[in-house]
Amino acid sequence: MRITIKQELYLITEILTRMGVSEEDAAIVAEVTADADLKGFSSHGIGRFPQYIKGLKMGTINPQAEVTVERESPATALLKGNHGFGHVIAYKGMKMAIEKAKNMGIGMVGINNSNHFGIAGYYSDMAIMQDLIGMVITNTEPAVAPIGGKEPLLGTNPIAIGIPSNVHYVSVDMATSAAARGKIMEAMRRGEEIPENVALDAEGNPTIDPCAAIKGSILPFGAHKGYALAFMIEIMSGPLVGAAYGKYVTGTANPEVECTKGDLLSVIDPSCFVDLDQFKSEVDDFIAEVKATPNVFIPGDMEIRNIRKFKKDGVSIDKKLEIQLKDLCQEVELRWDDVVEK
């Protein structure tokens, strides 16, 4: 079946508020989750929502958590999320990084004691909307083995960068692995195979079985290049921000255990380097050069195409996910018919 984005937003906010989450926090979680589905990141959209509910039930997500500032300077801050919703903590962290960048030219906010925050690109978009450059990195539970090894020690460690433009949406949001772990989990839920050259089983053999991939390891994208980038992100979103690293990172995929990953949110004000209008104009000039060849895409084009499609057609929900969502509705006494009538 398919649901509209409006229905998705209503479903998430209603379930969360009925479980004691504040309306403000529920709205943030819903918006970030729907943004993932709109952009085509279905592994981090409504399909990931049952994981957050399980975290609430297990107590690994604290809906009443208050974000505390551990360290702060005019351009930087280190936040402790106290195991609240990762979406809410990252949202507040990016707002702080944006304000610091407006005042100091650059703002960097590190986060620990948080939870899975959905797609990284939502937060870099927050900077774009303020005519700022945004960059977001985070580490995750081990899923990627170092080149030459079999034991997963690195996360899928995504990176998102957004750049303001007069005309285009310029954004990259990607895992440093050949596929996001969420894509593997999604294939497992749907009973589908994964593409070749994406993962290894526990014995280090190539596999297209998502169950074997989860027990084994995901390959880094671009071989040693993706591995090197994931390695650096592991340090910058682990030891740098007072969070766990390597095999000690837990809770990003398994909500039954406390989440120990970290985030680093960076914002740059281009006007501190060059005239803002000149910068945006030159970004657009460069994009025009790139697009002079027909059918050439820039980072962000696919997301725009997906947004148009999913706003019009809605989001596809497989049967297993539909059952999970209906069960959640029943738990909080929300009629499924009320959801689909929205």
Image (cartoon, rainbow, N blue to C red):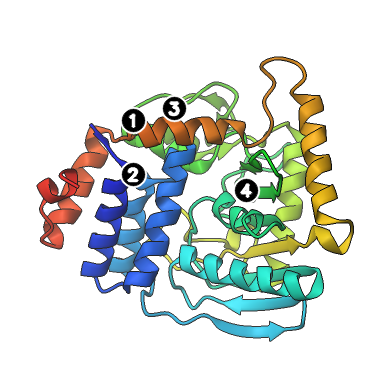
Residue at 45% in and 54% down:
32
Is residue 59 at least partly visible in the picture? no
Viewer-side residue, 277 vs 334: 277
Are the residues flagged by discs 4 and 3 in contact, CB closer than 8 Å? no
The residue that mark 4 highlights is 158
The residue that mark 3 highlights is 209
Instruction: Give the label, 2 or 3, closer to the camera.
Output: 2
Mark earlier in primary sequence (2, 4): 2
Residue 313 is marked as 1
Separation of disc 2 and disc 1 at Cα? 9 Å
Residue at 29% in and 61% down:
13
The residue that mark 2 highlights is 5
| In this picture, residue 182 sits left or right of residue 129 | left
* Secondary structure type for disc 2: helix
Residue 38, above or below 131: above
Point out residue 106 in the picture as x, y percentages from the top left corner.
Answer: 79, 68
Separation of disc 4 and disc 3 at Cα? 23 Å
Going by the numbered disc 1, the residue's amino acid type is Asp
Mark earlier in primary sequence (1, 4): 4
